[in-house]
Image (cartoon, rainbow, N blue to C red):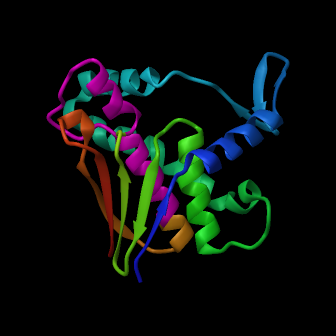
Amino acid sequence: MQKTYRATYKRGKEILDHYHSITKIRDGELKLGELPIVMARRVIFYNLWSSIEKLVGKAAHSIVLSMGKPQGISFAENLEKYIGHEKKDLDTAMDFLCNETYAIGWGAVEIELRDTDIEVRCEEGFPVGKEYVLINKVSSIPVDSFFLGYFHGFFETYFKERYSFGEVMCVGMGDRMCKFLFKKI
């Protein structure tokens, strides 16, 4: 089995428009439905990464990875609520994952499901890598650990499988795209 899913402008905009329609300000708090949220500039991810890296060096990867994984787990657990129906079919779930990622500004991802592994590609890069490109800086290590952790948590929860994983390409390191690889254990 091999199947590729891609984010599209049209579907991403539909999701973003839906999010706008259910987002309200209440008592100084922004809520997406009943979920408290914050809007943030992309640079916040870079600043978090950079600050942690200055404090602990390469160990920043593990720390930031552990921040992203619970978010992916939560998203996978709540997917039926997000897609608006009880049928949890693969095409709908992967389409929504790609396009929700696009709609919230993390990047236009492409997810390729294969028999023993999953590849996530983002041609323009994820937010931290993009910020490295913007400020004309090159990292010696992959920098999109939060997003790697997010997808890792999502895939392990959704597919109920264990995966070894890594960021094998990163625009923040000078690569032409960001690429995550997840292999079944």
Residue lying furthest left: 140
Q: Position of residue 147 (x, y in %)?
A: 42, 45
The residue drawn where x is 57% and y is 45% is: 9
Which of these two is toward me, 142 or 70? 142
Magenta stretch? Answer: 126-155
In terms of secondary structure, what is the magenta stretch mainly? Answer: helix
In which quadrant of the rendered view does residue 66 lie?
A: top left
Q: Position of residue 119 (x, y in %)?
A: 35, 63
Left or right of residue 158, residue 132 in this image: left
Q: Is residue 50 above or below residue 129?
A: above
The residue drawn where x is 65% and y is 60% is: 77
In which quadrant of the rendered view does residue 143 lie?
A: top left
- Quadrant of the drawing holding the N terminus: bottom left
In which quadrant of the rendered view does residue 31 lie?
A: top right
The residue drawn where x is 31% and y is 21% is: 134
Left or right of residue 80, residue 73 in this image: left
Which of these two is toward me, 154 or 102? 102
